[in-house]
Amino acid sequence: MATIHTPPTGYPAEITGYVDPWIANPGSTIDVKISSTEPELKYHVARLVSGPQGTDTSGMKPEIISAIPPGTCSGHYQVAQSGSYALVPERDYQVRNAGIEFSVYFQSHLLAAKHTQTLISTLNVSIKTGYAAVLTDEGVEFWVGTGATVDVISTAFKPELKRWTELRFSIRGTSFEYDIIPKPIFTDIPQPPARGSSTLSGTADIARPCVLTLSAMFAESHTKASQIATNFFNGRLDSPTMKSAGPSNQVLAQWDFSLQISTDKVIDVSGNGTGAEGRLINGPTRAVTGQDWDGMESDWTKAKYGYGAIHFHEDDLDDANWSTDFSISLPPNLRSGIYAVEIEAASGKVKDTIPFYVRATMETSNALGARVAYIISTFTYLAYANEHVFDRAHLKDTVNTVWKAIPDKHAEKTARRNDLGLSCYDIHNDKSGVMYSTAKRPILNMRPDYISWNFHRPRGLSADLLMLEFLEKSQIPYDVVFDHDLHTSGAAAISRYGTIITGSHPEYHTNESLGAYANYIRAGGNVMYLGGNGFYWSCATTAENFHRIEIRRGGEGIRSFTCPGGDRIFSSNGQSGLLWRSRGLPANCLFGVGCCAEGPGPGVGYKRTDAGKDTSFAWMFAGISEDEVLGEYGFGGGASGDEMDKCDYKIGSPSNTVVVATSIGHPDRFGMFPEDISFPFQNVLGTQTKEVRSDVTYYETSGGGAVFSVGSINWLCSLGWNHFENNIARLTGNVLQEFVRRHQLLD
Ligand SMILES: [Fe+2]
């Protein structure tokens, strides 16, 4: 496999890996893909049932699954080959002796890439045939094979950053001609065009059947072939067209990137022969503005023109495509849960815990008697997967300087394993935002002992395991359900449960997964939203690429980049990206609260409100004295911290929402979210405004159920504090028991 390499000299001992598929059904088989510097490995499968006690992981005792036999395997070091490109398999374009004319529009987003950047290539360096158009530090170059040599034609034309430029070249016999024509950006004056011609050292050998690539080539240079695609372009290509240079000037191939935008196909509209359909590798960004976009229509589903471009990046990754080290058959009666392959070097030198997820079936659910479902935020895990914000190289200009990176072992591994792709919080090397994230790779911040490098507390999966441990302790039978299942099955995935519980950070939802919540609530289900920043950004996926999530960030919301105005419609389904609030459905409408503020550093506790002291809420606060601070302690400081939500009737919190507790006041490290601010930012920090807060809310729904929300990512970090002996655990338990009791009454 091209993914297996020798680790660099001095590389530390390391094991990492992933499971494919990462969400599986009982009775199915999953493939485990491992990279290891150590030669001998041993593994077993466990169910994760506990969270970390801060940085102390000694109490995390996974339940070893004896029905899945442990095993051994040999280790090899694997890397992922990132870089996106279009690949058109070998095809005879019927060039014959006439020669070709090739044209393409390109828009460079990274001028100094420190390597050659390929626009288009049919080059086969081994036999010195074909041709390529590339960008080097010296400018546009053409490489043309004659069978005897590969000629290099330099132009000294250096493109300007982000300016569309039309590139045309023709090859006939020994004649080579080119035209490079920069386009104006609306009404400005571009640099002058470049034109030239030259005589090749021999007749061009370009008529053979060839593999054609856009944005990459299978050559390290014009003299050295490469087994893997390399020399990636960073920028946009539009309308690549190959014509015969003969008198007929027949179109031999013409790729229209505005077609089948939701797929990985590139479509040839030439009508010539079998069609030169190609496929996209590593998920370049589709549904982006092209060379003829004029700002008059910003929705590609409605536009008649302007969306014929694809944005390629040298650091795109869609599928690490590692070789499988072993497969695991999941027993048909395996209960739903968060599982992991625990794998360790035989020497004991290094280990890793590689999570995967198992769905419930009607049989496993009935066997448990599950009345409660814990929804695991698999969309949010993907959005944050391998985020590199900590390394500052990408985001030094946009990240608050208060956030000091304190790398832990996971962050160090993420920095070392730069090959494993980016998150939707990162920007590419060319400074454009990352729109897609993938499950087909190791996700290094999705580990049970992960401690966030900037919040210094469990976050994501590691925080959500604290609630799982609480459920285990409560002895209430539960299933786990995944965002991806809500997307696929809608409310049917959860309709059999009386209560559903969110994780700490259920931020990202598709139209379908959010609709599942809405329908569940409408039908009378009870919801415990035990996190913050929930139901905030919209996301999308496709059945074809279900391992991939798509996010388009607009000019509002807490964000690490902003998509240009024409690039805010999902390629996956043609829906609007942006915040759910911007799409008209703030989280407040369904959950009583919506995200409003965030900050690093320790959180603060809550105080019960007068409304919360009403005797009608005695059941909720049973065992908690009236004026005690709720959640004063936790792995993140107080229970209100990180990202926080508040009740806001004016943007949609139901009028019967009761704020039963509210946070006691945040320092100025915490600030309001931009979408709540209409005029120049003033009085937006913690001590300056009451708008920086978490609210604990409760409302009874039209369907006969109720929604309890806590408005803080930190909540679970306080729930787990002191081994669950605290008033957040008591309050959470009271609500859970009451919701379960109410549902039982309906039986
Ligand atoms: Fe978030």
Image (cartoon, rainbow, N blue to C red):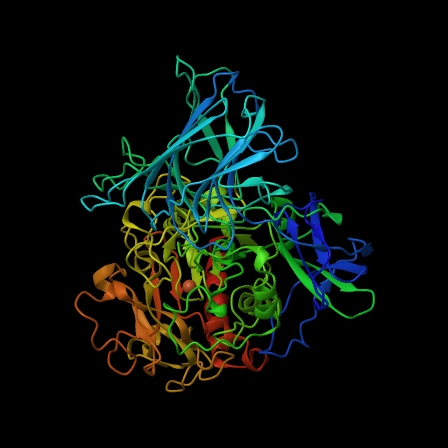
Q: Nearer the viewer, residue 308 or 485?
A: 308
Q: Is residue 285 visible?
A: yes
Q: Position of residue 439 (x, y in %)?
A: 56, 51
- The total number of labels drawn is 0
Q: Compare residues 217 and 655 and report the one nearer the observer.
A: 217
Q: Quadrant of ligand 1?
A: bottom left
Q: Position of residue 300 (x, y in %)?
A: 31, 37
Residue at point 27%, 34% (across, down): 303
Q: Residue furthest top?
A: 248
Position of the N terminus, as image quadrant, is: top right
Q: Position of residue 28 (x, y in %)?
A: 69, 43
Q: Give whichever of 470, 251 is nearer the camera.
A: 251
Q: Horizontally, is 572 left or right of 145 in the view?
A: left
Q: Quadrant of residue 600?
A: bottom left
Say whether residue 255 is visible.
no
Measured along the vertical axis of the image, is residue 650 above or below residue 116? Answer: below
**Relative depth, front residue between 488 and 348:** 348
Is 547 situated left or right of 182 in this image? right
